Image (cartoon, rainbow, N blue to C red):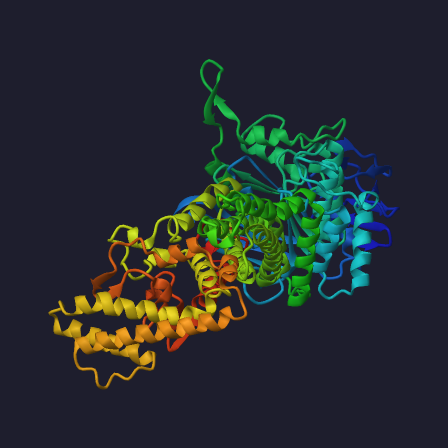
Amino acid sequence: MRLRRWVGGFAVYRAAPHEQSAQLIVCNVTADDFFFIKDLGRGDLKLNGNPVQKQSIAPMAQGSVIKDGAGHAVFFSDVVQCCSTCDRVEQRMQFEALNLAHFFNYPNEAALRPLSIKAQSGDLIGIMGASGSGKSTLLNILNGSLKPTFGEVYLNGSSIYGGEGNAKGSLGHIAQQDVLISELTVYENLKFSADLSLGGAKEKERLERVELTLRRLGLWDIRNLRVGSVMDKTISGGQRKRLNIALELIREPAVLFVDEPTSGLSSRDSEHIMDILKELTLRGKIVFVVIHQPSSDIFKLFDRLLLLDVGGYPIYQDNPLECLGYLKQMSNQVQNSEAMCTTCGTVNPEEIFDTVASCMVDEYGQLTENRRVSPEEWNDYYNMIQEGGPATPATEELDSPEATVVPRWSEQFRTYWRRDVTAKRKNKQYVWMNLLQAPLLALALSVFTRYRSAEGEFVYRLSENLPQFLFISVIVALFLGLSFSAEEIFRDRPTLRRERFLRLDWNAYLASKMTVMLGISAVQSMLFTLIAVAVLHIPTGAGMLFMTLFSLSAFANVLGLNLSSAMKSAKTIYIIIPLLIIPQIIFGGAIIRFDRFNPIFTQVDRVPLIGNLMASRWGFESLAVHLTRENEADAPFIAFEDRMERAAWRRDFWYQQYRLIEDADVRSREWEGALDELNSWGIATQSLSTAEDVRHAFKDAYKEAFKARDAERKAVSESTDLKALKDAHHNDALHEWVMQTDRHERIALTDRGLVQETAFIHQMPLGRQAWNAPFYAPEKQLGQWSIKTPTFNLFVLWAMSALLYFILANRWPERWGWGKRLD
């Protein structure tokens, strides 16, 4: 039988011309999907296996099937689809998957065997199969998340994998995994989803759509309840599932893929969820549902069933009510014509799996492990039926999917930022932990390192633990920045995986996330600095302390986001955090001095490569140099002391070693270096011809610098108490730390010539580029420019952060295969 026409609320079914006379009238008397039938033909029709008397009227409910004496069938879905081919469908859709096959490692590890699927507007297609049958792989291929090894998927003729067209934006996916943001309310979850989904709608339209969706799914009364997590439930499992569906329904995708929508739900909630999905198909949507063990009522909702066997073999693709009979017929079982119970109309989907995986018995009547029909044999039957079945209707020429309007970058950024801030603000534990961590650590660290003299009075100059405090502060900043950012993207991964169908800009999400992280780091760095300065009386370094700690935290933020994007589990993330922090401690230049590393890895006058890769090295050096040179007690005299230190070293150590050098090239380089340094001080060198002359020149330079410093001190002392100034601004321990006067050797011969091994704090670059400069050098040379070390080091920290951000923006951690791809 086939449909001839639909007039008003009546459908007329007639037999084909070559068949005997048969006529059936179907009447839809309400807006509900409930029909009445009347047999006007020969009286051999059966409804769900029960005879229909000629000229009598019988109700036809969901999941029903009508058969005539010749075995022709009209299913309930046929009637509904006929009824729905009216003006209710705004744009007809045709979804085609042609010759799909997928291998994890071609030609080995087959995940999905050759398969083609065609669906059109109004189809609800169920995908069933045992574990390991490739259901999830097929779903990921169909929704565009995974490109198959062979084959192509089209929507109205447009490939869903192509860069052009609107096909990808017309797809939606509801994962089995919960994608709700637990801190937000039901309304907020859906509102933020609407802001990201409905780019072309005005705010009023979005609000109306949110309210309509909540009312349609029965969630309006709980709209102000916090969603909560799966372990900390505030709303029921059925309500959570409906809200997950609402996140996709808000934008009404043309094709919707749903993974296990009924798992973990009661039978009533399961039926409610499936009724919602069925309602979508009545509005012209195409819905694919992966489901494991549906009830009889749910099973009968499907228009078509695709059954997969272990190994990715397709074994059935047709009306679900015919599946069990087909399987029994192919496996030569008795009662193979029964599709459902003739008494109650119940279908047992579990019997499908029992039939597929039924095993043979041995001579003792015991079941063996050998299947009666192997997956390969089922697939052969399937291919035979597909090839010998009725010709597939030709693909219609349909309009390309309508373009979905993507919100502007600024709108995406604002929505992402508001959603993240709102969620964090509502998590009181998160707020208090991040607010209290920095001040508590600062208080504990500064109190325990606050050293007082025997007289019991704290003097900043005598605070012996200041270098250690500065270095631990650097490590604390790195730890804080890394610990609260390392799980951010990982926690958002389910939501991001759903939102990839919206074609949103990854950089908008990343920029919003980074802005929030930087805001938190700025607050933490400020609180840490305020308490540390107050307890330790750090005088003029508060601004640099804040900037350094904030820059270190920013670097750690980006590092944490990379880690979050790369790793597959939270446990792995927190195992790796110490592995990132410990090298910062070891190679930061404070715990183990660079000159005391294994000589294979370092040189006496420069930082080794591994040290230059550590953010802690740049942060600690920045603070040490700034507090040593830029404080009010030393800054007025530092230029004179630089000259005095270098002139004394040239006079006392360089001169003696220079006389012992025999290599002419080395002597020439050292001679030119000494003259260049004198020239940089404004001292004429034209008359200098011997080493003794140069020694006297440096001796005179030392005397002049010494006199100038004393004169400056005298001038300052007239208006300021120098001792009080030094007590308040100069720290002896830090000065000794950067001078490194405990070294026994003061000069060494390297491949660069003679180098000073102490007082790096007073050594200017003199042509040495920044990466070759000694630790604690006051300036770094970049090309022709000399930049103060604190400023240069901050620049390096932000450059390192920018590099990590570039890596994250290009999604290299995902492409390297460490984490789960989001696109």
Residue 790 falls left or right of residue 298: left
- Residue 101 in the image, given as x and y percentages of width and height: 48, 50
- Residue 604 in the image, given as x and y percentages of width and height: 27, 59
Can residue 582 be spotted in the picture? Answer: yes
Front residue of 449/665: it is 449
Q: Quadrant of the C terminus?
A: bottom right
- Residue 513 in the image, given as x and y percentages of width and height: 60, 57
In the picture as drawn, the residue positioned furthest to the left comes out as 662
Which residue is depicted at the point 60% across and 66% down? 165
In the picture as drawn, the residue positioned furthest to the right comes out as 29
In the picture as drawn, the residue positioned furthest to the bottom comes out as 686
Front residue of 459/808: it is 459
Which residue is depicted at the point 34% across and 63% down? 760
Residue 265 falls left or right of residue 374: right
Label tally: 0
Task: Determine the image quadrant of residue 352.
Answer: top right
Front residue of 775/635: it is 635
Front residue of 453/119: it is 453
Image: 52 above or below 4? above
Which residue is depicted at the point 29% across and 51% down? 596
